[in-house]
C-alpha cells in the first residue's frame, strides 16, 4: 500500500497538493482527513470525492503531518489501498444510543469481513466513547482491533464534527472498517503522566461526575496535591491547569491507568465532570505535571509495538490529546518526531478531545492526555 501525506490552509492549497502527489501515477482510494473547523471541509471532501477517494474525516484542535504541527489547516493521509479491503460507515446517535449505533456498524462490518478492524472518529462533547467501543466488542469480540479519537473544535468547546463523502454530523461517528485478512492494523495508547501519592478511593460519583475522593470534594483534594491556588470561578486558567497537568489516574486491575481530567466544575459542591466514567469505589491517584519522561514513554511504547507486533508499516495515524500540546507546548514536535522515526513512513494526525484504544496490557477504553498511535500495512 502506497501512502502520501498532504496539507494546506485552503481548499486551493489542498487541490494543488493533491494534483502534485498524483502526478506520478499515485492513485489514492482512501483519505484520512484531519481538518480545522476554520477550513471548508465540505469543499475539500467534494474535491476528494470527485477524484474517487473515500473520506474519513474529523474536525480538530490542531493537525500535523509527521512532526510539523499546525492550527487552522487540513492534514490528509492518502492511501492507495485496494477498495475491496475497506469500507466506510457513518451512523448518528441523536438519542445518545452510542452502543447501539456502534453495534449497527459492527454488524455490517461482520457481514462484509470475517475479521474486521475499526478506525473510529466520534463527534459531540457528551458522546460516550467507551459505550461505542463496547458496542463494537459486543459484535466483533473483546480482542477486536479498534482505535480512534474524538473530534475537536479549535479549543472553542462548542461543536465538533465527523464527516465522509456526502455526510457530516455533529452528533455521530464515522468508521473505516478494514479487512484484517488483507490489512494489518496495530496500535498503542500511551500517556506517560507520572502518579504522585498513594491510592485514594472515589467515595461518591455518578458516571463521569466525581463528587468526592476520600470524602473530600474532588476539586479541593486535586488543588491540594497540585499546590494550586485561587480556586475560584473567577480563575479562568484553573480548568486548563487541572485538565492538562493534574488529571486523576483511574487505576485498573489490568493494564496501565486511564487518565480522567476534570473538565467542568460544579461550584455548588466543588465536584467536577471528567472526560469518561469514574466508578464510585474506584481507586485513583493524582498526577505530577509532565516532563521529558512523558514523551519518552510514548516513543518507547511505539518502539515496543514495532518490536513485538508490527515490524513493518506502510502508514501511520495518530490521535494525540489536545491537553498534551497545552502541557508540552513546542516540545510536542519532539514526541511526534520520535514516533514518526519508528517506521519512518507517511504519518498524519490530530489533536483530539479524547482517544480510543487499548492501553498497554489493557482493555479498549476512552483515554485522555494520551497519544494513540496506529500503524497500517497492506499484506
Image (cartoon, rainbow, N blue to C red):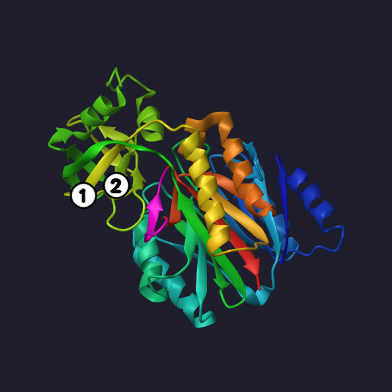
The x, y position of residue 294, in whole percent, is: 47, 38
* Residue 178 position in % (x across, y down): 57, 71
Indicate yes or no whether the magenta region holds residue 364: yes
Q: Is residue 69 magenta?
A: no
Residue 235 is at least partly visible in this image: yes
The furthest residue to the front: 307
Task: Say which residue label 2 marks.
Answer: 250
Start-end of magenta stretch:
360-368
CA distance separating discs 2 and 1: 7 Å
Horizontal and vertical percent position of residue 175: 52, 64
Residue at 19 percent of width and 45 percent of height: 205
Please tell me which residue lies in front, 173 or 249. Answer: 249
- The quarter of the picture where residue 158 lies is top left
Q: Residues within 10 Å of mark 2 (few under 14, many from 20)?
A: many
Nearest the eye: 201 or 53: 201
Residue that badge 1 annotates = 282
Task: Relative to 139, say whether 48 is above or below.
Answer: above
Amino acid at each position: 500500500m502506497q501512502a502520501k501525506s498532504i496539507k494546506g490552509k485552503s481548499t486551493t492549497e489542498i487541490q494543488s497538493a493533491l494534483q502534485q502527489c498524483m502526478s506520478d501515477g499515485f492513485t489514492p482510494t482512501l483519505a484520512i482527513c484531519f481538518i480545522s473547523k476554520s477550513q471548508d471541509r465540505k469543499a475539500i471532501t467534494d474535491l476528494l470525492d470527485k477524484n474517487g477517494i473515500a473520506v474519513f474525516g474529523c474536525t480538530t484542535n490542531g493537525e500535523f503531518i509527521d512532526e510539523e504541527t499546525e492550527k487552522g489547516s487540513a492534514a490528509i493521509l492518502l492511501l492507495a489501498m485496494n477498495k475491496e479491503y475497506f469500507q466506510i460507515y457513518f451512523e448518528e446517535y441523536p438519542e445518545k444510543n452510542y452502543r447501539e449505533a456502534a453495534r449497527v456498524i459492527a454488524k455490517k462490518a461482520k457481514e462484509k469481513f470475517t475479521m474486521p478492524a475499526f478506525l473510529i472518529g466520534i463527534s459531540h462533547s457528551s458522546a460516550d466513547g467507551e459505550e461505542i467501543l463496547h458496542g463494537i466488542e459486543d459484535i466483533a469480540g473483546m480482542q477486536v482491533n479498534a482505535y480512534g479519537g474524538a473530534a475537536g473544535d479549535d479549543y472553542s468547546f462548542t461543536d465538533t464534527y465527523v464527516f465522509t463523502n456526502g455526510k457530516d454530523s455533529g452528533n455521530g461517528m464515522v468508521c473505516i472498517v478494514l479487512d484484517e485478512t488483507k490489512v494489518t492494523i496495530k496500535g498503542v495508547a500511551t500517556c506517560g503522566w507520572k502518579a504522585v501519592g498513594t491510592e485514594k478511593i472515589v467515595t461518591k460519583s455518578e458516571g463521569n461526575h466525581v463528587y468526592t475522593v476520600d470524602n473530600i470534594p474532588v476539586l479541593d483534594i486535586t488543588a491540594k496535591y497540585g499546590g494550586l491556588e485561587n480556586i475560584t470561578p473567577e480563575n479562568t486558567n484553573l480548568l486548563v491547569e487541572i485538565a492538562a497537568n493534574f488529571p486523576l489516574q483511574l487505576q485498573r486491575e489490568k493494564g496501565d491507568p486511564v487518565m480522567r481530567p476534570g473538565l467542568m466544575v460544579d461550584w455548588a459542591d466543588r465536584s467536577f465532570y471528567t472526560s469518561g466514567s469514574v466508578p464510585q469505589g474506584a481507586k485513583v491517584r493524582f498526577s505530577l505535571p509532565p516532563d521529558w519522561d512523558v514523551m519518552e514513554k510514548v516513543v518507547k511504547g511505539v518502539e515496543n509495538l514495532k518490536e513485538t507486533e508490527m515490524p513493518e508499516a506502510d502508514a501511520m495515524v495518530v490521535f494525540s490529546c489536545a491537553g498534551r500540546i497545552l502541557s508540552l507546548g513546542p516540545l510536542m514536535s519532539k514526541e511526534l518526531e520520535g514516533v514518526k522515526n519508528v517506521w519512518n513512513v507517511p504519518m498524519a494526525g490530530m489533536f483530539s478531545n479524547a482517544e480510543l484504544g487499548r492501553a498497554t496490557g489493557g482493555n479498549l477504553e476512552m483515554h485522555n492526555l494520551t497519544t494513540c498511535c496506529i500503524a497500517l500495512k497492506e499484506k
